[in-house]
Amino acid sequence: MKLNNIYGDRFFEADGKEGGNPPAPVVDKEIEAKLERLAHLEKENKDLIASRDKAKDAKRKEEESKLLEEKKYQELLNAKEKEIESLKPKVDAFDQLRQVEIDEAKKVLGDKWDDEYESLSLIALRKTVQLLNVKENVAGSDNGKIIDPPKLQLTEAQKREALEKFPHSTKEKAEQAWFEVLKETGKIK
């Protein structure tokens, strides 16, 4: 390759191999400072882009974790809604039972009924109706008292059989169960 070299006011063609090095370009100090500033700004720009990418990545991960938590909460909410839906028929049935009990109590008590009784629990309402609906004692009756059931009448041999037949039960439960079996089979009246 041939280059034109200027020597004084003359032009010469020079070969890169002969005659030495081509002349070095003259760089102004202001241009050199600007180039250094440009390199510095490019490095800062690359650093800012890298930090922006890291911040975006961190924000994306945070949003993903938030979505996962929301999904878990949504699943929990859906499960609770299903549970509530399954309980609604029971609540409706209880409300109907309560209304039937209140209507019966109103019939039984008649003039003794007070609107405050509606706010009582079912057990308290039943006891209130029982207390307010006391009738006079009738001769020759038990007046609604509960009498204890008769005691079991098993022989010693039958008691041993009961323990053999029901080894994992308590003595009383085994005897009761064996008594029921004997009663069903007609061996005890």
Image (tube, grey):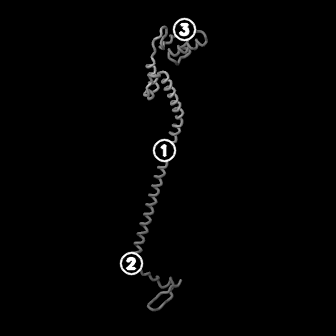
Badge 1: residue crowd in 10 Å (few <14, some 14–19, many ≥20): few
Earlier sequence position, callout 3 versus callout 2: 2
Q: Nearer the viewer, residue 179 or 130?
A: 130
Alpha carbon of mark 1 to alpha carbon of mark 3: how far? 64 Å
Q: Is residue 162 left or right of residue 34?
A: right
* Mark 2: amino acid: Glu
Tell me where residue 29 appears, x and y as whole percent: 38, 78
Alpha carbon of mark 3 to alpha carbon of mark 2: how far? 123 Å
Dot in front, 3 or 2: 3
* Mark 3: amino acid: Ala
Badge 2: residue crowd in 10 Å (few <14, some 14–19, many ≥20): few
Q: Which residue is mark 3?
A: 157
Answer above or below: position of 135 versus 8: above
Q: Which residue is mark 2?
A: 30
Dot in front, 1 or 2: 1
Q: Residue furthest right?
A: 185
Q: Which residue is mark 1?
A: 73
